[in-house]
Each structure stands twice: as structure tokens, then as C-alpha cells.
Image (tube, grey):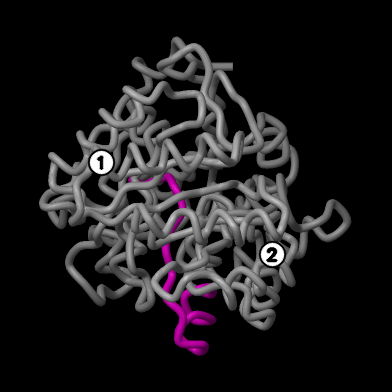
Amino acid sequence: MVNQITVSAYRVPTDVPMESDGTLEWTSTTLVLVEASAAGVTGIGYTYADTATAALIRDLLAKVVCGQNVMANGKIWAAMVASIRNLGRPGIAAMAISAVDVALWDLKARLIGVPLVTLLGPVRDSVPVYGSGGFTSYSMTQLQEQRAGWVGEGISRVKMKIGRDALADVERVAAARTAIGSHAELFVDANGAYPRKLALAQAERFTDSMVCWFEEPVYHLDLDGLRLCRDRAPAMMEISVGEYGYDPIEFAQIIDAGAVDVLQADASRCEGITGLMLVDALCEAHCLPLSTHCAPSLHAHPACAAKRVRHIEYFHDHVRIEKMFFDGVLSPIGGELRPDLSRPGLGLEFKRADAAAYAL
């Protein structure tokens, strides 16, 4: 029986004065941590979200979960989803459910004494990552050094942000290609900054730099625009979206619209590991590849159990925070994350003393 759910929040400043993408600027990132306890064992889960997420967990979801059978993950997940009906499912509510669901899966694996990937059932031993950062606020030198650094570490795919200035974007993408050489894969992410026709024009311009992944070329809810980009983009350029998907219905709508070549999902947003595995089933049924978004330490185990996962986003900000806050964080070896099978659950231990300075 789950006997306690506790939640805490931490705000970590960026390692440069400000970071930005095509549509947003930020100076810090907030991590909301959930600890779920049963029989003297504690599991952890987290999401990157506003502190309102913590309030919702504390005031509502904890009451729903406590007293439930710790082994009944699906039943608890359904109860949490039902409990937020009047609040609206997407956004804060889905992220709150995500953090609790992850903590419950971690707890279950720890109680059984196995790694989470073993509990879920592995389909692979490791998962490739792609280096992600390249913020629009970076200087050209910062952009090139970060990209070249990842490639030098054996990560053969790298992503950068675009969308602030269309002409400058073309120059920055070309500079990134120069930095990584001709063999590494180059991804770009507009975060929905471009209108449809400009997105198509940019896709053509980026072919000179051998861009093979164009993420959110238009607003993520513009499914017709995404379909247009998917149909008309260069043949070797994949269109991706999904990081703002919060429940299985939203992902089904993206798929039904024919909007993507690769679907993205984030277990810290899409209602946890339970939600991620449902998205994987959708991708399996529609022969689509799946890529996990951000939070690499959270995704390493479920990504090894999800049939359609192609790779994990190794996002600069989250990599930094996870190394600060957790023991057991995995580092890529040969460009891949391999779960540590000697550690139960997610393999993470919260460094409470180190995190205390950032507590809210």
C-alpha cells in the first residue's frame, strides 16, 4: 500500500545569463520532485514544470494515491486521470500525474528489487541519444563548440534551436554543420516559430547543410501546417512534433492528421511512464518511430522497453540539473545510454543536501 506521497520543488538558474529558442526566453528551470513511499521503500519521480504542479500533487493527487495497492500502477493512473476531470487534462495536471506515475513505477521496481527496465520488459540494452541545446541566445562560437563537443564524445546526432531570424538561422545552421563535419546528423528545432510558407522555404535552404530533422517547423497545434511541411519537405528531412502532447488522445490526433514522420513524447509531461507506453503502442500500431523528449535520466529505462523508440534527447539544461541532483545519472557511452542493471528502479538517488540551496 502506498503510505506517503511528498513533493518538493527546486529552481536552478541557467549556466549563462539567459537562454532562448525560437519563441521563448528563460533564466532558470524548475524541477518538481515526487517521493512515493511504501513498506519503508521510497521511489522518485519528477517533472520540469511550474510550482503549481507541486501544489496540485500535494492538494489532490496525494490523496488519490495514498492507500492504493502499490503494485496496481494502471489502476492508480486511471484514478489520477479521473480526479482531474474538472481541472482540464493537458498541461499542469498531466505533468503532475507524470511525476507521481514515474515515482510509483520506480517504487514498484525498488520493492521487487529489479531495475525498472527489467520490470517493464526490455526490447534493447541501450538507446542512442542526440545532443540538444544550441540556443538562439548562443554566440556562433558557443554554438559550434557545443555541437563539436558532443560529436567528439561519440554522440553522432546534434540539435540546435532556430526561429528568431530566418536569414541568421541559415547562417547558424551552416556554421553548425561546419563544426560537426559531414558524417554527424544535424537536427533543427523551430519551436513553432515559423509560419507555414517560411517553414517550407527554410526546409529547402537547410538542405545545403544536410539537415535531416525539422522539429516543430510551425505551431505544434497547426496539424494541417505540419502535414503540409511533412508532405513538401525534402525527402531526407523528417518532421517531428509531440513534446507538448499530454494524453493519448492528443497523440492519436497527431498521428491521424499525418502530421509527423517521427512522433515525440515526454514521460515527464504525457502522464508518466504509463502514458509513454501507451504512446509507444500507438506508434507501433501506425508504424511510426518515437523519440523521447528531454529528461534523459527519466527516459533511459522506459526507452529500452518501448518498441518504437529511436533515440533520447540529451538536453543540455536537464543533463546539468540531473547530474547536480541525482547520484546514478548515466553518461552516454558510444553515443548511447545503457541502464545500470545493478541498481533497482530508475537507478537514481536524490542528493537532498546538494539540492537544498535551490529549494522553493
* Magenta stretch encompasses residue 285: yes
Q: Quadrant of residue 305?
A: bottom left
- For label 1, the residue is 178
- Neighbours of disc 2 within 10 Å: few (<14), some (14-19), many (20+): some
Q: Quadrant of the C terminus?
A: top right
At numbered mark 1, what does the secondary structure look like: helix, strand or loop? helix
- Say above or below: 207 vs 168: below
- For label 2, the residue is 79
Q: Nearer the viewer, mark 2 or mark 1?
A: 1
How many numbered circles does the render carry?
A: 2
Which amino acid type is shown beneath numbered disc 1? Thr
Give the CA separation, mark 2 to mark 1.
51 Å
For the record, the magenta segment spans 278-297
Percent position of residue 3, x then y:
53, 47
Residue 215 seen in the figure: yes
Percent position of residue 37, x then y:
46, 44
- Say above or below: 10 vs 185: above
Does label 2 or label 1 sit earlier along the sequence?
2
221 left or right, relative to 311: right
Residue 10 seen in the figure: no
Furthest residue in direction right, as rendered: 86
* Magenta stretch encompasses residue 181: no
Residue at horizontal 65 percent and vertical 67 percent from the top? 226
Which amino acid type is shown beneath numbered disc 2? Ala
At numbered mark 2, what does the secondary structure look like: helix, strand or loop? helix
- Neighbours of disc 1 within 10 Å: few (<14), some (14-19), many (20+): some
- Say above or below: 190 vs 358: below
Percent position of residue 51, x then y:
66, 29
250 left or right, relative to 308: right
